[in-house]
């Protein structure tokens, strides 16, 4: 099951990266699918050695498939291996359902919403 497109827009993934102190915030909007996961993983993975905490905001995703879930899990494992804290925030209903079906929700649930 994938998150269904909300607005029918053409597929794209936008990623905004900001750093505050030792925390890097990655805000994703659009589609996190097989087409976009290689670039997403590369861009986020390169951040791991230079930060203590990565916060991935998925609140603006309109579509996510199993490749997106796999990318998030892969980044989580890479971050943990490098002793970098990794959190997902602002999970919409469909992302929560995907992570729940994959038995991964408990891994990411504690982060909750991020209030800027």
Image (cartoon, rainbow, N blue to C red):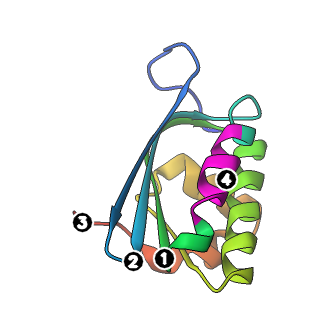
Residue 1 seen in this snapshot = no
Residue at the disc numbered 3: 115
Give percent across and percent down for residue 80: 68, 81
Task: Please give the name of the residue rendered at 68% of the width and 33% of the height, measured from the top-left corner.
Answer: 36
Q: Residues within 10 Å of mark 2 (few under 14, many from 20)?
A: few
Q: Are marks 1 and 2 in contact (CB under 8 Å)?
A: yes
Query: Seen from this angle, which residue lies furthest front?
Result: 50
Circle on res. 98:
4
Instruction: Say whether residue 44 is magenta.
Output: yes
Q: Residues within 10 Å of mark 1 (few under 14, many from 20)?
A: many
Write down the region rendered in magenta. 39-47
User: Marks 4/1: CA distance?
Assistant: 24 Å
2 vs 3, front mark: 2
Q: Are marks 3 and 1 in contact (CB under 8 Å)?
A: no
User: Marks 3/4: CA distance?
Assistant: 23 Å
Residue at the disc numbered 2: 22
1 vs 2, front mark: 2
Give percent across and percent down for residue 110: 49, 80
Residue at the disc numbered 1: 53
Q: Which is more N-terminal, label 4 or label 2?
A: 2
């Amino acid at each position: 099951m994938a998150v269904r497109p909300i607005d029918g827009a053409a597929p794209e993934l936008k990623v905004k990266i900001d750093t505050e102190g030792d925390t890097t915030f990655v805000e994703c909007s659009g589609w996190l699918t097989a087409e976009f996961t290689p670039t997403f993983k590369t861009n986020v993975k390169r951040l791991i050695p230079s930060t203590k905490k990565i916060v991935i905001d998925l609140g603006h995703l309109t579509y996510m498939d199993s490749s997106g879930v796999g990318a998030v899990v892969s980044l989580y494992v890479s971050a943990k291996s490098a002793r970098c804290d990794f959190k997902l925030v602002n999970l919409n209903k469909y992302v929560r359902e995907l992570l729940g079906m994959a038995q991964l929700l408990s891994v990411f649930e504690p982060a909750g919403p991020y209030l800027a």
